[in-house]
Image (spheres, rainbow, N blue to C red):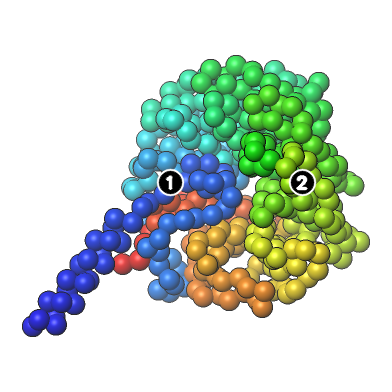
Amino acid sequence: MYNRLHALWFFLLALLLSNLAPADDWPQWRGPGRDGVWKETGIIAQFDGTQIPVKWRVKIGGGYSGPTVVDGRVYVTDLAPNPNEEKERILCFDAETGKSLWVHSYETTYTFQYPEGPRASVGVCDGRAYSLGGMARLVCLDAVTGSVVWDKDLKEVYRARIPTWGIAPAPAIEDDLIICQVGGSDGACIVALDRKTGEERWTALDDHCSYSAPIVIEHAGRRILVCWTGDGVVGLNPKTGEVYWRHPFQSPRWADATGTPVLNEGRLFVSAFLQGSLMLRLVPGKPDVEVMWHRRGRSEKETDALHSLIPTPILDGNYIYGVDSYGELRCLDARTGDRIWENLEIIPNARWGTAHLIRNGDKVWMFNETGELLITRFTPKGVEVISRAQLIQPTGKQAQRKGGVTWAHPAFANRHIYARSQSELVCARLAAD
């Protein structure tokens, strides 16, 4: 009897501690740190079967914007499914039940390719939700009620040059500013607005717009805004727009800067579909960079190092893990760009093959374009697939895929995953029992 009571006491204590473990929101593109890192504990070690049980699902329209989750609410954008109207919508759902809480919509006219819906994730901060549409309309809403705080058409104000696939970079929130890459004319590729009023604070760069979301890093005793535009990788003062440094990195054919720059141990890494991979070193003690290496293959099929389009790679010490141009999962030597291994079994080997990589402890959770969720471990010796299961069915006709794809980045919050296709948003519980 004593042993049974002792075991029961330990079980209840473990359950209590598990329930008290901190839960995180997913307030912006690529998570709390904007770095694709999911820090929650108390997560399942593997799936029970080949299909992940869905806690709730709701119908939505098309779009590539990944969901965000804050204070028990899920935010996502779409194109209204009614074929007789062209409206972008900002949607808010209850994170626990999927119940619709509010919808804000406005008319739009797309002039870009793949016009299935908006691209940029909603950012939420201090009770306000910020949404940048596919034609550069920036809307600030009350995150609880959905009422409009301010609304600004950046295409009209800054004569933004909409790129081939529309405006995609998720805005960065820095102190009292919201910073957007919109490709405006006359030195307004990057635009910083007062996030409370929508008033302009500064503009910078004559560059063309890319699809890469800006990040803010700490270096040389200051905050530096890193923007990968259609013309190069640039470091700016986020308060003023002053350019600290820039390195040209322009595609030979069309703007293909899509993944987010990644930072690790004083190095910045970017990878493009046509231009290959570039590793920059942050110069110690001053706001500047220098090139460590640049690798580029002969074509989009004869690649060298990594030619990535949609997914953002992982830079971890001496190793880079990422997805190449036709879905090849690769490990590179971060010091040289030399390939260490390649895996062809996880991602479809098709043009722009995609899987999003999210780090959680010593594991990498992968969400691939067929709607599968995988728990894996990456090492210099290879990738270990611990568990894999289907989460959502792919949809759409993107890239001539038979059966469609799921290209939007998922959100991981409160030990749940939130993922969307072109027709639905789903939620599944990932907490360990």
Disc 2 vs disc 1: which is toward the camera? 2
Q: Is residue 317 above or below residue 407?
A: below
Residue 293 position, x and y percent, is 84, 57
Q: Is residue 29 visible?
A: yes
Residue 39 position, x and y percent, is 47, 56
| Quadrant assignment for the C terminus | bottom left
In this view, the residue in front, 426 or 201, is: 201
In this view, the residue in front, 264 or 109, is: 264
User: In the image, 278: left or right of 237?
Assistant: right
Query: Which residue is identified by label 2?
Result: 283
Q: What is the secondary structure assignment of the residue under circle 2?
A: loop
Disc 2 residue type?
Answer: Val
Query: Which residue is identified by label 1?
Result: 25
Q: Residues within 10 Å of mark 2 (few under 14, many from 20)?
A: some
Q: Pointers 2 and 1 in contact (CB under 8 A)? A: no
Disc 1 residue type?
Answer: Asp
Q: Is residue 259 visible?
A: no
Residue 189 position, x and y percent, is 75, 29
Q: Residue furthest left?
A: 1
Residue pictured at 33% horizontal, 56% vertical = 21
Q: Is residue 168 above or below residue 240?
A: below
Image quadrant in which you'd find residue 191: top right
The Cα–Cα distance between marks 2 and 1, rounded to whole angstroms, is: 34 Å
Q: Is residue 430 above or below residue 155?
A: below
User: In the image, 176: left or right of 312?
Assistant: left
Image quadrant in which you'd find residue 319: bottom right
